[in-house]
Image: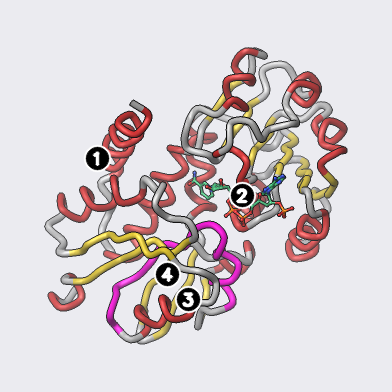
Amino acid sequence: MADDILTNRIGLIGDPVEHSLSPSFQQPAFDALGLSIRYELWQASLDELPARLDDIRTGRALGANVTVPHKEAAFALMDSVSDAARRAGAVNTVSLQDGRLVGDNTDVHGFIVPLRERGFDFVASRAVILGAGGAARGIAVALLDAGIAGLAIVNRTRQRAEDISAALSDPRITVGELDALSTHASGANLLINATALGWDDDAFPFISDTFARLTPGATVYDLTYRDTPFLSAARSAGLTAIDGLAMLVHQGAKSFEIWTGQPAPVELMWRSAVAARAERSG
Ligand code: NAP
C-alpha cells in the first residue's frame, strides 16, 4: 500500500457519533501495525452524508464506518456493494477501490461471532429480532446464512419488517408488530434487541412476558454495548445474556481488514474496547 494512502483518515459517519467506542479500539490497532491512519468521528446529518462520502471518493479520506441512522442511505450512495451488503440492503463499511466507492456490511460477520463462540445451535433454533433498522438487516442475513430454522422480525413500524422479508424472500421469515412480540417469542431460542432502545434505561416495555415465553436457557442478545436492563432481566430469568461489545469489535476488525488489507489485531482491539467501556462506565 502506498505511503500517501497510509497517511490518511478513516471516520465513523453517523448521527450521533460521540458515544461511539470505535476510535478506542481502531486507533490502537492502526498504531500497533505502524499505519499512519487516524480514526475520527464524523457527525453527519442525512443531508451531509453525500459530502462525507465524496471525501472518500476524491481521496481526502481512506474509508469510513457508517452507523445509526445512515446504513440504508449509505447503501444507496455506493458505486458497488459486497454480497453481504446487497442482501442486507445496508452498508456499515466504505472503502475506495479503483476510484469507486465500495460498500460492505461487516455487521453480518460481527453479530455471528459471539454466538458461534458459545456453540449456539442455529439449525435447531428459532430466533426473534426486535427491530427492523440497518442493524436488523445484517443480523437477518447472518442468521439465515447460519441455518436458523425460523426467524421472526418484529418492529414498531411493521412495514420496515415487511421490507426486509420481501428483500430476503426466505420462507423461514415471519414478521409482526411490537404488541405481538410475546407471541412470536413463544418457543424461540434466541431474542435479539436490535432497536435503538438499549441506550435508554427506562424505555424498554417488552421484557417480562416475553422472556417467560422463550425456551428455558434461551439466549438474549442486545446489540447495545453495555449491560442493559434488558440483559440484567434476562440473566435474572436464567437466560444466557450477550451484549453488543463483541459484535462491535468483530465488525470493526473485519472493517480494518477491508481498509488495510492486513489481518486485524483482534485481541488488542478487544482488550482496548473492554478498557474503554470500563473507563466510560466508571
Ligand atoms: P436504525 O436503522 O436507526 O433502526 C432503529 C430501530 O429501532 C428501528 O427498528 C426502530 O423502529 C427502532 N426503534 C427506535 N425507537 C423505538 C421506540 N421508541 N420503540 C420501538 N422501537 C424503536 O438503527 P440501527 O443501525 O439498526 O441500530 C440499532 C441499534 O443497534 C442501535 O442501538 C445501535 O447502536 C446498535 N448496533 C450495535 C452494533 C454493534 O456492533 N454492537 C452494530 C450495529 C448497531 P422503527 O422502524 O419503528 O422506527
Earlier sequence position, callout 4 versus callout 2: 4
Q: Please, what secondary structure does the residue beneath circle 3 have?
A: loop
x 64%, y 51%: residue: 136
Q: Residues within 10 Å of mark 4 (few under 14, many from 20)?
A: many
Task: Name the residue carrying label 4.
Answer: 94
Query: How far apart are the two marked residues, 4 and 2, measured between alpha carbons?
Result: 19 Å
Earlier sequence position, callout 4 versus callout 1: 4
Query: How far apart are the two marked residues, 3 and 1, measured between alpha carbons?
Result: 33 Å
- Compared to residue 231, the image places residue 247 above or below, namely below
Residue type at mark 1? Leu
Q: Nearer the viewer, residue 169 or 162?
A: 162
Query: How far apart are the two marked residues, 4 and 3, measured between alpha carbons?
Result: 16 Å
Q: Residues within 10 Å of mark 1 (few under 14, many from 20)?
A: some
Task: Name the residue carrying label 2.
Answer: 139
Task: Name the residue carrying label 3.
Answer: 48
Earlier sequence position, callout 1 versus callout 2: 2
Q: Nearer the viewer, residue 112 or 270?
A: 270
Residue 3 x/y as whole percent: 13, 75
Q: Which mark is residue 268?
A: 1
Residue type at mark 2? Ile
| Number of the front mark, 4 or 3 | 3
